[in-house]
């Protein structure tokens, strides 16, 4: 009886060992990610004021001469650069963070899946940064030009620095996510969850979904919502085109 129990205990232990090793590896990946983010945070915080002035240029450019930015809370002059530095550290570490994700899931993938996932990871990083750059150079100037032009007479625009930071980080995140749409479409098609023809027939629902998604992620003004929804729809169409042109391996066709 004891021999059977010992054999059962050994079997349970052998089954738990891979799970524990995965947890240990996950812990190491998370610690590496946190270390890199903290490492990038230190120099970014040193130049936090200069960086904030750079990201505030799209608004400062359209403010009247008598207007400016203010800090309405006591701790805002300290906390706002701190939040900005941490957010930029995470954005800057995105390639390394995705690389850690890749190293964690790579052992469980087949060779043909690895050949597909690596370009997807690289494309995701590039497209995320393209979305951030697009929001800064194309969207924000148009939004601030519009909002400052409709200010009632006699009202001075005095934007709070912490509220402005929340506004732009929300825009950066929203456009970074939206620019991932082509990758998402290609993954769905490649994995066999859907087809290009099915996605084409669902185009009207996708367009409505783009505007609903933009309404949730952008500030409550029509201009920024349109500037997010229209690129989202165009990126969806680009994903359909790339999915149709995407070569299929012999394993997929069989």
Image (tube, helix red, strand yellow):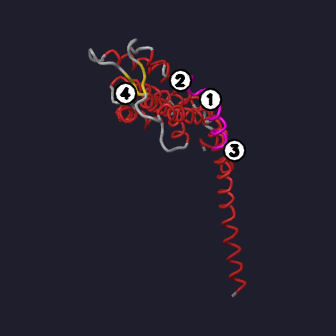
Q: Is residue 166 magenta?
A: no
Residue identifier under label 3: 111
Say which element carries label 3.
helix
Say which element carries label 1.
helix
In the image, which residues are magenta? 34-51
Image quadrant in which you'd find residue 250: top right
Residue identifier under label 1: 46
Q: Residues within 10 Å of mark 4 (few under 14, many from 20)?
A: many
The disc placed on residue 225 is: 4
The disc placed on residue 133 is: 2
The disc placed on residue 249 is: none
Residues at badges 3 and 2 in contact (C-beta under 8 Å)?
A: no
- Viewer-side residue, 74 vs 243: 74
Which residue is found at the position 33% from the left and 26% from the top?
221
Residues at badges 1 and 4 in contact (C-beta under 8 Å)?
A: no
- Viewer-side residue, 186 vs 10: 10
Residues at badges 3 and 4 in contact (C-beta under 8 Å)?
A: no
Say which element carries label 4.
helix
């Amino acid at each position: 009886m004891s021999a059977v129990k010992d054999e059962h205990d050994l079997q349970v232990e052998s089954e738990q060992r891979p799970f524990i090793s995965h947890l240990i590896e996950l812990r190491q990946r998370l610690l590496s990610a946190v270390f890199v983010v903290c490492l990038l945070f230190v120099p970014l915080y040193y130049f936090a004021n200069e960086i904030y002035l750079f990201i505030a240029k799209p608004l400062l450019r359209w403010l009247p001469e008598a207007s400016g930015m203010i800090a309405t809370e006591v701790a805002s002059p300290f906390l706002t650069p701190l939040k900005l530095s941490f957010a930029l550290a995470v954005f800057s570490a995105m390639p390394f963070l995705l690389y850690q994700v890749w190293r964690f899931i790579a052992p469980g993938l087949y060779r043909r899946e690895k050949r597909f996932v690596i370009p997807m990871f690289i494309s995701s990083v590039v497209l995320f940064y393209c979305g951030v750059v697009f929001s800064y150079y194309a969207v924000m100037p148009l939004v601030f030009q519009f909002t400052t032009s409709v200010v009632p007479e006699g009202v001075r625009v005095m934007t709070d620095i912490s509220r402005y930071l929340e506004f732009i980080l929300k825009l950066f995140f929203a456009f970074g996510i939206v620019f991932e749409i082509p990758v998402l479409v290609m993954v769905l098609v490649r994995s066999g969850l859907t087809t290009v023809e099915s996605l084409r027939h669902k185009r009207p629902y996708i367009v409505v979904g783009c505007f609903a998604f933009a309404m949730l992620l952008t500030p409550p003004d029509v201009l920024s919502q349109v500037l997010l929804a229209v690129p989202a729809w165009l990126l969806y169409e680009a994903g359909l085109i790339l999915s149709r042109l995407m070569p299929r391996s012999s394993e997929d066709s069989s």
